[in-house]
Image (spheres, rainbow, N blue to C red):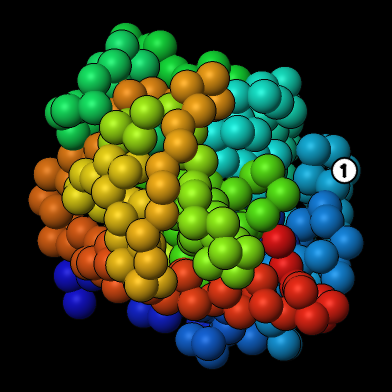
Amino acid sequence: MADKNKRAVDVLDKDSLIVVSGAGGFIAGALTKYFREQGFNRIRAIDKKPLDQWYQRVSGVESLQMDLSEKDTCTKACEGATEVYNLAADMGGMGFIERFRIECLRSILINTHMVEAAYQAGAGRYFFSSSACVYNTTLQADPNVRALKELDAYPAMAERGYGWEKLMSEMFCREYWAEREMKTFIARFHNVYGPYGTWDGGREKAPAAMCRKVIEAEDTGNYEITIWGDGRQTRSFMYIDDCLDGIDMIMHCDKLIATPINLGSNYLVSINDLVSIVEKIAGIKLKRNYDPDAPKGVAGRNSDNTFIKQVLDWQPATPLEEGMEKTYYWIQKQYTDRKAGKRTVS
């Protein structure tokens, strides 16, 4: 099998220990389920949230509540690991990122301790979940932004707080390969969305927030929606299933050792377009109110997928409308269950 097409099932014994940090959250929780469904028997899932607050608890997985900002905890977490997937971070949507920059910056402790712990444990491969927020913000000042290539992270002018933390953590991963020959892999996520993620409470991202707002409008009969900014901000959004597949292939492609790579859709839409998609799914039309003072991030951001297509002959394939429909109906079920007094994730 060509190197570019390898996945964990092609290179690992089913009893290899896979460690997934941040597993109480959206992407890492889905990744834990992904590996379990492929038949891996030893998965250690870790998050600082209490277990009953995890978005997904996967049967047959060693699920641990641990604070990975502490060095000794990371040592325990990585003990015996064959592969380590570090997706743990204190983060959320733009509302959280802009208001809590110190908390976002402190996530550098997690990667600093985790990559060292993985090295000391003799792990064969280490994955770090970076972000498109590392890109130079001066290149993202127009909604009609050109797609961002991997080299556009330098000269560095990352998004304050969260973006700088990710960029520094990338450097750690790259130097562990250069100096210690530890195989590290770095994916820059571009707006991942889907079911089993945050949809309320202040940490949700735009796709989930729009779904919830439309559901609330229909439920209350108040057919209005508040949009942060002027709605002309543009983004690309990647469905969770594509993200998981991409993580797996990136992690097992030696051409990508210590090489940051975009992992995202290159289909650019405005926030207004995103609202229209959700309205169509719900079968309603809403009056749009705009809040120019709300957090809104850069004016435009899109993923240039030239490199990932070249190296892996792959890019995310789920149409935005299809992914949003699945996300909408999952959030609608959560919303309905919460109204009925049932336990939900948020």
Quarter the C terminus occupies: bottom right
Residue at 72% x, 49% y is 201
Q: Is residue 305 left or right of residue 25?
A: left
Q: Is residue 8 left or right of residue 66?
A: left
- Where does the image place residue 122, in percent across and percent down from the top left? 63, 54
Between 46 and 209, the residue placed more toward the observer is: 209
**For residue 210, above or below residue 304:** below
- Name the residue that disc number 1 marks: 72
Secondary element under disc 1, as helix, strand or loop, is helix
- Where does the image place residue 233, in percent across and percent down from the top left? 32, 31
Between 139 and 16, the residue placed more toward the observer is: 139
Image-quadrant location for residue 138: top left
**For residue 112, above or below residue 124:** above
Residue at 47% x, 22% y is 292
Quarter the N terminus occupies: bottom left
Residue at 80% x, 38% y is 69
Residue at 51% x, 41% y is 226
- Where does the image place residue 57, in percent across and percent down from the top left? 73, 77
**For residue 201, above or below residue 177:** below
- Where does the image place residue 283, in percent across and percent down from the top left? 36, 72
Q: Is residue 45 left or right of residue 7?
A: right
